[in-house]
Image (spheres, grey):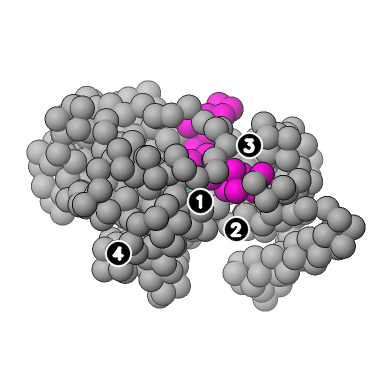
Amino acid sequence: MKTSEDILKLLSAKPKTALGFFPTPFYRLDNMSDELGVDLYIKRDDFTGMSLFGGNKIRKLEYLLGDAKKQGAEYIFTYGATQSNHAMQTVEACCRCGLKPVLYLTAVVEPDENDIRGNLLLDKIFGAEIHIISINEGETEAEADARSRKMAEEQIKRMEAEGKKCYNVPMGGSSHVGAAGFLGGFAEMSQQADRRGLDVEYIFHSCGSGGTLAGLCAGKKAMGSKAKIISVSAMGHESDFASHCAKIGNDALKWIGLDPILSSEDMNIDENYYCPGYEQPSKGGTEAIKMLAKSEGLLVDPVYSGKALAGLIDHVRTGKVPQGSTVVFWHTGGATALFAEHEILGDII
Ligand SMILES: *Cc1c(COP(=O)(O)O)cnc(C)c1O
């Protein structure tokens, strides 16, 4: 069994670019705790920095861009939806490090050229090279994503032929290098919980490309923690998603010099709260956004963190999480979606 200090020490031997403000705050939500009847804490990874608009990708990018710099890369390619938080955080991190970001973005929601909003607006202010891939008629989102990756690979090939060095960051930054950031995240939160004498029983977080889940679950298992991590999906996943995440988590453990111990049974992926679909508002998500805003003065978003909080609230209300439990809501960020296209936010007011 490893301690949080062991994990952090192993990670410190890896190439890393300091980007964020760590440790992120961890504290009790007194009003929401009273409302729900559980002891509710929040891990503020919406507050990682670097700009006002941080989020969970900064932890991953510290290692990803560290690796990119070690390899001598100048150009960072990455992928996502046009309103991708990951793409925006990659761009801001690249600006800080003197790297040039190139984005291939799938228009899940087609942006209005005369009214660019949210993360896409920020990507443009930060000066990223942006390629927008519209979804063709009869094409699925996944097919458009695959097409955009192929176009990027062709551009990388052309640029490398000219002697330019490119580094590819997968969608969501969810490689084992990115997930290692969440091995550190789990260790960091464990230290904060220990200092308060807390025995964390449940952790809820939003899940997309799986790197956060992989890192948290791997950290939890390596440290022998009994906390139950509930990964609330923001989108539908293929049936092999859990084993895909187990592999990322195991590769992250190996990368820092530990044994791979994760299996898909170690994960609790809850697919019940993302409908009607990715970047489509849900009733539960809208309620959760308003509830947290009014009771704590804090914001979650309609695509990810709001739906994860909706999952947490529902698990408590239906007794799946017993009254009096110690629960952590891992805030992964994303509030820029509150200023995205109306289709994404829905009728919240
Ligand atoms: C990317 C993202 C997630 C999901 O994290 P993954 O590591 O991709 O699963 C959750 N919340 C927000 C706000 C995000 O931007």
* Amino acid on which disc 1 is placed: Gly
Residue underneath mark 3: 93
- Quadrant location of residue 128? top right
Counting from the top left corner in percent of width and height, residue 339 is at: 58, 35
- Residue 175 in the image: state x and y as whole percent: 52, 58
> Which residue is rendered at x = 67% and y = 57% of the image?
168
Q: Which mark is residue 178?
A: 1
Instruction: Report x, y in % for residue 155.
Output: 81, 61
Question: In the rendered image of this protein, does residue 181 appear above or below residue 152?
Answer: above
In the picture, the disc for residue 170 is 2
Q: Of the numbered discs in the image, which one, if any, rests on residue 261?
A: 4
Determine if the magenta segment contains residue 68: yes
Ranked by sequence position, the earlier of labels 1 and 4 is: 1
Q: Nearer the viewer, residue 175 or 151?
A: 175
**Which three-letter amino acid code belongs to the residue tagged 3?**
Ala
Q: Answer whether labels 4 and 2 touch (C-beta < 8 Å).
A: no
Q: Does the magenta-highlighted stretch encompass residue 174?
A: no
Circle nearer the N terminus (1, 2): 2
